Image: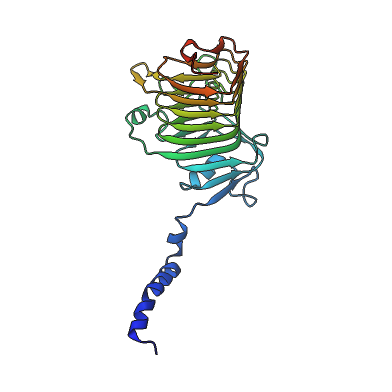
Amino acid sequence: MRSPKKLLRLFPALLIFLLLVLHPLEVRSTQSRGWTVCPQGPPWCSFSSIQQAINAASPGDVISIQPGFYRESLIIRKSIVIQGVNPQQVVIQGVRPGWPAVLVSTAEPGDLLSLVLGLDEPIQVTLQNLQLQGAPWVSQEEQCAEPGSDICPDGLQVRGRVTLTAQNLWVHDNGDDGIDLGLHPRATIQNSFIWQNQDDGIDAWLDVEVAIIGNVITGNAANGIKLQSRHQVTSWLSVTGKVKATIINNQITNNGGYGIAAQSGEEVVSCYGNLIQGNGSGPLSPEAWGRCS
C-alpha cells in the first residue's frame, strides 16, 4: 500500500488527469479550428458560402477556400485567416450594390463615430490567394451604398483598428477603389495585382500605416496609390491623422492620375525600387516629390 506522503506527491498529476478527462471541450476550445468552403458544400467541405464560414468561425480560425466562383459581398469583423488555393481559381464576385466585395471592419458597417473615437476592439485578419472583383455601383447616378456611410464598392475595404495582411490578391474591375484603407488600420499589401478599378488602386487615409511591397498596380481610373492625412468623412465630419506609407519594389503604371499621390505633404512616405511610368498625371504628385524614387 502506498504511503500517505507518496499519495500526496501523486495528487497534482492525478488532478490534471481528471481535469483533462472531465473537461475535454474546454481544453479544445482554446485551439484554432479549420473550415473549408467549396461550391458543392457538405459533405465535401464545411460550407458552400464563404460568409457562412466566417459567421461560424471563432477568432483565430482558418478558412480554406477551394476553387470556385463565389457571388458574395463579405463582411469580416473578427480575427481570422482566409486563404484560397490561388487567385486564379478562387473568385469572389461582389454582388451587393454599393458595397465592397470584402469589408473588414471593427465596427458595424457605416458606424464611423465609433471608429473615429476609437471605441472599437482591434482584430487581426489575413487574406491570401483570392480574386476580388466586380463590386457594383448602386446605379449610374449613385456609386456608394448610402450618402455619408462611407460604404462604397471597393474590392477590399478596411476600417478601424485592423491589422491586415493581404498577400497574393487579384483585385480588379470594382466600382470604386481596388483597396481602401481608412480610420486606423495597420496593413501589409504584398505580391498582389491591382488593376482596372474605377478610382484609385490603393487609397490610404486617416491614421494608416501601410507597407506596399512587390505589387503590380496598373490601369486604375485615378491614382495608382493615394495617401490622405485629411479626410472629409461626411458633410459634417472632417478628421485628420497622419498616413505613413512604405512603398517598395512595385510596378505602378498606366493609371489615370498620378502613380503616387500624396494629399497634403503631411504624409510620411518612404519609397524606393519602384517602376512608376505611363501614369496620366505623371509619376508623383507635387506633395510626393523628393520622397519617392
Task: Indicate the position of residue 158 as horizontal and vertical percent values.
Answer: 47, 30
Task: Indicate the position of residue 4 as horizontal and vertical percent values.
Answer: 33, 84
Q: Residue at x 39, y 90 (%)?
A: 1
**In the image shown, does 173 or 52 lie closer to the viewer?**
173
Vertical position of residue 292 compared to residue 109: above or below: above
Task: Indicate the position of residue 87 as horizontal and vertical percent values.
Answer: 64, 35
Q: Residue at x 41, y 35 (%)?
A: 106
Specify whether residue 63 is in view.
yes
Vertical position of residue 167 compared to residue 151: above or below: below
Vertical position of residue 59 compared to residue 174: above or below: below
Task: Indicate the position of residue 178 as horizontal and vertical percent values.
Answer: 55, 24
- Rendered image quadrant of residue 192: top right
Image side of residue 3 versus residue 88, left or right: left
- Rendered image quadrant of residue 184: top left
Image side of residue 239 versus residue 280, left or right: left
**In the image shown, does 240 or 250 lie closer to the viewer?**
250
Q: How is the image coloured?
A: rainbow
Q: Residue at x 47, y 20 (%)?
A: 227
Image side of residue 38 versus residue 153, left or right: right
Vertical position of residue 211 compared to residue 291: above or below: below
Q: Residue at x 46, y 13 (%)?
A: 287
Specify whether residue 145 is in view.
no
